Amino acid sequence: MVRTIRLTINGRTHEIETDDQRALLWVLREDLNLTGTKFGCGMGLCGACTVIVDRQAVRSCTTPVSAAAGKQVLTIEGLATDGQLHPLQQAFLERHAFQCGFCTPGMIMNAYGLLLQSPNPTRQEILDAMEGNLCRCGSYHRIVDAIEEAAARLRGGKQQ
Amino acid sequence: MKPTEITRRELLAGAGLYVMIPVEILLAQEPERLPARAGYPTDFNAYLRIGPDGSVTGYAGKVELGQGAMTALAQLLAEELDVPYERVTMVLGDTELCPWDMGTFGSLTVRQFGPVFRAAAAEARAALLEMASEKLGVPVQDLEVRDGIVRERRNPERAVSYGELVAGRRIERRVSHATVKAPGAFQILGTAPSRKDGLEKVTGRAIYAGDVRLPGLLRARILRPPAHGAVLRELDTSEAEKIPGVQIVRDGNFVAVLHPQWDLADLALKRIRAKFEFQEVPLDDSNIFEHLVKNAPPPHTVHQQGDLAVGEKLAQIRLEATYLNSYVAHAPLETHSATAVVQGGKVTVWAGTQTPFRLKTQIAETLKIPEQNVRVITPYVGGGFGGKSASQQALEAARLAQLTGRPVQVVWDRAEEFFYDTFRPAAVVKIRAGLDAEQRLVFWDFYVYCAGDREAQQFYDIPHQRTLASGGWGSNPPGLHPFVVGPWRAPSVNTNTFARESHIDALAAQAGIDPVEFRMRHLRDPRMRRVLEAAASKFGWKPMKLPSGRGVGVSCAMYLGTYTAMMAEIEIDRNSGEIRVQRVVLAQDQGLVVNPDGSRQQMEGGIMMGLGYALTEEVRFRGRMVLDRNFDTYRIPRFSWMPRIETVLIENPEAPASGCGEPPIVNVGAVVANAFYDATGVRLYQLPMTPERVKQALAKT
């Protein structure tokens, strides 16, 4: 149904008139030009489109924008605050936990969602939570290490 | 290994041809000017510019696929120019700004382009020293450079910066005796600085071809046939046209739906009713191998030595086997994407491509416009692996931009990404080999169908041998493959290594000799011996007879001048048939290492990606229909697959920098197959080693 939808993305509110069954991914990318969230498969199978909706990681390619209406949406563009990288971003950067970078926003946002639910995850919990995110370049080991490091830093109280 | 001599005359004579020239020519003591190598410009200004503030911009026709080209090239430039790495910015893959390049593949960035780029920087530095000498009134030999500032050695206040000398202009000066630095003098090469692409990639600011935004940009979704070769017979776009904002474009049988939003264009596309006609081709995975052997072109002899008949007579143990592998997809996470705009007769295309310059020519041909009116810009590419050497999506975008006069973006969906992929060819390798009375390899007859001949010739010491190859991953006779095949990370080499190393292992087993020892007995090349020893040492290889039941395997290969030895340990779930790779050790000698961390990333990544073709990846098809449309059926490696990986990078700076992005993957199929044999006493002859095939093979015993 075409209607006016209020979306709060990265702290900013947008009013968009569109079909509320459209996938959140495309509203972000096409209507709002937030291109950090990626299209990899369109079926929720690769995780490249992961964003946070009300503190939960979701696959935006299979989430209708109606499900995000009135909620807080966080995308990769909103993670750094006041020019300071989030510890996840910092850890990914320092450990070179990426190659082509296409899966990276989805990886970081999915990890962010994990750490919101579980600030002290075991390595197995990290693997289980991240299993739905694919990396063709094979940076998996560094990604896990980066998440562990970021989790430790966050628990150290440096930044939330 | 003594460097091959090659004269300047031979280099110049080679200009315009694709000639593989040994890179040794430009190490330390070798002079001179930039070689006229395979089309690279000889004016060093083509490769770099220095701003008034001393910032350095490097230009290269290579592209960043994730493999670290941007970083490695920045390091090469900073090193030879003597400027801080932090001050270098690379501009890559822009056909208007960057020097011509043949394409980003074949591990050529460091291996072949590296020396060209270094020589350009070295000549620029020499020219700058001359300019500084004139400005300061100090002889060149009394000057030194650090951080882009030229100073008189004994009187450092007498100084001038590169920025002051050049101020953004071209350097109109040639120096004929510039030399590149010797490894002993390196400050930046051999280190692992922060990757140039890192900040953009972790913040979501990295732009890929599908992220380009232009005013009035339309997204295009294109009508596709259900099978390759199918012809459009009936078309009804009336339902599609009901979606507000939709525009249908038709040019012959090329039908596209345009809309400002991708998903609405896609929705409209799905409402098009179309009928296609195609002939069923009676091929699928049950008969493809038989078909390939029967229809492959006549073989060429890759290599021959001794006399097979003599060798066969001397053999006490003979072993014959056929090794198979199916079609494999590239499956990069970023689908093929491009954005095109036509403005005043000039076409600009942003494309996720590995071959921007070749694409520029192809666009000009497709649009029937002069090449100089075409510009290809390559942003970050979300994975290539050889699959983005073909850039059909860019031609589609350009065509639509020309037809509509609007900027157009084409982003393939995952089904198109599988359908139009240029697959790694399905292949058959037949090997007959034998051991003499001393259990030494005495004959080896190797015939590879369709994979290609790279590394088909083996490197073990065997007096009587012949290597034949039919077909490859390049152009093939029509009807041989149901779809297009193409270069897939280390083309030919995964297949040939799987076959060779499986067979070597099987012979070792027959002889009752430890598989590492068996290989060593037949290896004379010291670099090969060294990587094998290094892998064994790191792994903790314990001599044994196959099958030991432990599930450990070994495989060796060389490719693009790089030597690799891999060892792995696996576990098998006999109920489900799943193979779990627990641990992998890779020892690699790639000569001079530009960036050890970048190299390790390639090693780790190659191992992870290789697990896919070893265990699950095969393209399902029926005739010319591709049945895999997404990651639900085409399974690629995931977090849960991670083995413990240990990499050993051999230090060998005397040897020229050789391939790094591809060699790490080539052993994976073989090492897992060999470990499987060690675990079970059963040999698997077909990749991928799926749970079904594992269970079938185990059931036979």
Image (tube, grey):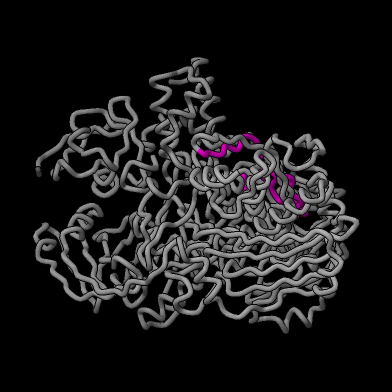
Residue found 78% across the figure and 37% down from its top = B541
Q: Quadrant of residue B663?
A: bottom right
Residue found 56% across the figure and 53% down from its top = B687
Q: Is residue B484 above or below residue B10?
A: above
Which range is magenta? B577-602
Residue B481: x and y, percent? 47, 71
Q: Is residue B53 visible?
A: no
What quarter of the picture does the C terminus of chain A occupy?
Answer: top left
Q: In the rendered view, does B91 fall on the left or right side of A27?
A: right
User: How many numbered badges does the structure rendering display?
Assistant: 0
Q: Is residue A130 visible?
A: yes
Query: Observer-nearest residue: B214 or B153?
Result: B214
Q: Quadrant of residue A78?
A: top left
Residue B1: x and y, percent? 87, 62
Residue found 50% across the figure and 57% down from its top = B328
Q: In the rendered view, does A74 fall on the left or right side of B475?
A: left
Q: Is residue B352 above or below residue A147?
A: below
Q: Quadrant of residue B312?
A: bottom right
Q: Is residue B376 above or below residue B660?
A: below
Q: In the rendered view, does B213 fall on the left or right side of A138?
A: left
Let me know if residue B595 is in the magenta part. yes
Residue B400: x and y, percent? 28, 70
Query: Observer-nearest residue: B430 or B156?
Result: B430
Residue B643: x and y, percent? 60, 36
Residue found 82% across the figure and 38% down from its top = B543
What quarter of the picture does the N terminus of chain A occupy?
Answer: top left
Let me know if residue B666 is in the magenta part. no
In the rendered image, the residue lying farthest to the right is B438
